[in-house]
Image (spheres, coloured by chain):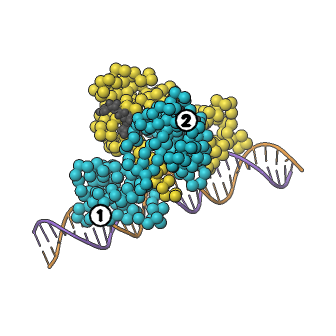
Chain colours: A yellow, B cyan, C orange, D purple
Amino acid sequence: MKQELIKKIPHKTIERLSQYRRALLLCYDKGQTYIFSHEIANIQHITAVQVRRDLMLIGYSGNLRRGYNIKDLIDLISEIIDNPDGQKVAVFGMGNLGRALSKYFKDRREKLSIVAGFDVNPDKVGKSYYGVPCFHIDDAKEIIAREGIKIGIITVPGAYAVETAKLLVEYGIKGILNYTPTPVEVPEGIFLEEYDMVTSLEKVAFYVKEAK
Amino acid sequence: MKQELIKKIPHKTIERLSQYRRALLLCYDKGQTYIFSHEIANIQHITAVQVRRDLMLIGYSGNLRRGYNIKDLIDLISEIIDNPDGQKVAVFGMGNLGRALSKYFKDRREKLSIVAGFDVNPDKVGKSYYGVPCFHIDDAKEIIAREGIKIGIITVPGAYAVETAKLLVEYGIKGILNYTPTPVEVPEGIFLEEYDMVTSLEKVAFYVKEAK
DNA sequence: TTTGCACTGTTAAAGTAATAACAAACTATG
DNA sequence: CATAGTTTGTTATTACTTTAACAGTGCAAA
Ligand SMILES: NC(=O)c1ccc[n+]([C@@H]2O[C@H](COP(=O)([O-])OP(=O)(O)OC[C@H]3O[C@@H](n4cnc5c(N)ncnc54)[C@H](O)[C@@H]3O)[C@@H](O)[C@H]2O)c1
Ligand SMILES: NC(=O)c1ccc[n+]([C@@H]2O[C@H](COP(=O)([O-])OP(=O)(O)OC[C@H]3O[C@@H](n4cnc5c(N)ncnc54)[C@H](O)[C@@H]3O)[C@@H](O)[C@H]2O)c1
């Protein structure tokens, strides 16, 4: 896969590739070897055209009669979205959400693992949650550098989101996933993804109200 | 606000309105009475043009010299996105994520409250988590009808997401927020919002890898 | 009074993403 | 061997979203 090509892949396609891979892994585990675009589309509830277009963008060619080779496709998607040396993630704020995420992501992806949590609460620091050790935020700089952590998930209370994000960037984090309802700002070159659960729920509520 | 106009508001604008309101409530609590589009934009890290465009779409007019009246704007947004009689929400699957959400949303919005949780685990049924009572899924039909619950958040294991969604629709739920990595399908007229945390994290990982 | 500034509100353009359309290839079948 | 039926791969079109451009307005200060 050429570097040039990858740069041109739309964000939405990257998201779908992650989802295709997960669906494909399930099929692979069931012993299926080939799959048609419309089968992938059915699982993901999108159109077959979109699947084919996404696969075109990553330069994968299927077999006209049998469709796509599941193993090959999984490998190609993995080659695109995974880092061969793995990537380490840390959770900032080991509250309810932080701990839920720690447990959930534990051993879920070979190339993407949560290796540390950080908090300010002395009751939490020093403990381990589902195999993820919790450190004091004051030790973050050293641990991030030592472990080579490049990705941070922010689950501190909203009021501390901005300062936390600033710290992370300072300490060398290159990608942030912010689950706080408070938007944060990052300098050029740092990737930021924000998701606000309250907004999602309010959106659902709005459209439910409208449908009446 | 005319019904016709509301129908034309883009989904993305609805999401931002929810976020504007939250930011405005903070300003209001601090005693601020007026705000400029560029101030809202700064808080949300978007452009002032987008803010003005969104407000144009909901038909709100500001004051040329002082900007927008915070109280009035909060009220208008609330009129648009809130249901005057309130809306009841239920969580399906009182695991780590379900409980985190239950706690978090408890008493956070006047017009939007989680009133019940459902699970199959006998250890959880009958208990109450942060004020949200947990019932057996077998009683869902009756409780949904009795309480008039119209919105469901799905946090069961992925393998049960599809059947859960089907049940909810059958029982009269009109809007679903699915946090499971498994896509579900709903009939026409039911609003569905899906969010996949694994995909978000993998997306961040991808762009971090690319930035190297 | 008039000129300049800092806003708002709206229309126009650009950018991004999804959908449709269709040619090409392969296979099974008569 | 021709033909119908599928499926892929690509280009064209349409829809959606953001960004840009700019006219209009009120105020302050010269
Ligand atoms: N729990 C949910 O379901 C949910 C839903 C939507 C949004 N959120 C958001 O996620 C964030 C966390 O939610 P939660 O329910 O887990 O809250 P929580 O209060 O349970 O956890 C917050 C944790 O952050 C720690 N903390 C506080 N300041 C810190 C700092 N400066 N550095 C490091 N750690 C710090 C606290 O000690 C605590 O452990 C909040 O911003 C919340 O708005 C949570
Ligand atoms: N925890 C996270 O941070 C996280 C992150 C991303 C995605 N998710 C997704 O959210 C969902 C829940 O995650 P979790 O960590 O809370 O899991 P969990 O195992 O802690 O909770 C699942 C709960 O659902 C209940 N359940 C099982 N089958 C059910 C059924 N048919 N009806 C009702 N309840 C049922 C279980 O008893 C359990 O209490 C999963 O699909 C997971 O993929 C969770």
Q: Note whether D29 is above or below B165 in the view shown.
A: below
Q: Give the CA separation, mark 2 to mark 1.
A: 50 Å
Q: Chain of mark 1?
A: B
Q: Chain of mark 2?
A: B
User: Which residue shows up at 49% across the image and 35% down it?
Assistant: B134
C18 or A127, nearer to the observer: A127
User: Which residue shows up at 61% across the image and 40% down it?
Assistant: B163
User: Which residue shows up at 28% across the image and 48% down it?
Assistant: B26
Q: Which residue is mark 2?
A: B136
Local crowd size for mark 2, using a 10 Å CA cut-off: few (<14), some (14–19), many (≥20): some
- Callout 2–callout 1 Cβ contact below 8 Å: no
Question: Residue C22: horizontal and vertical position, in percent?
Answer: 67, 58
User: Which residue shows up at 58% across the image and 32% down it?
Assistant: A75
Q: Quadrant of the N terminus of chain A?
A: top right
Q: Determine which of the numbered discs, if any, sits on residue B62 in the image.
A: 1
Q: Note whether B109 is above or below B6 in the view shown.
A: above
Question: Residue A152: horizontal and vertical position, in percent?
Answer: 38, 33
Residue type at mark 2 is His
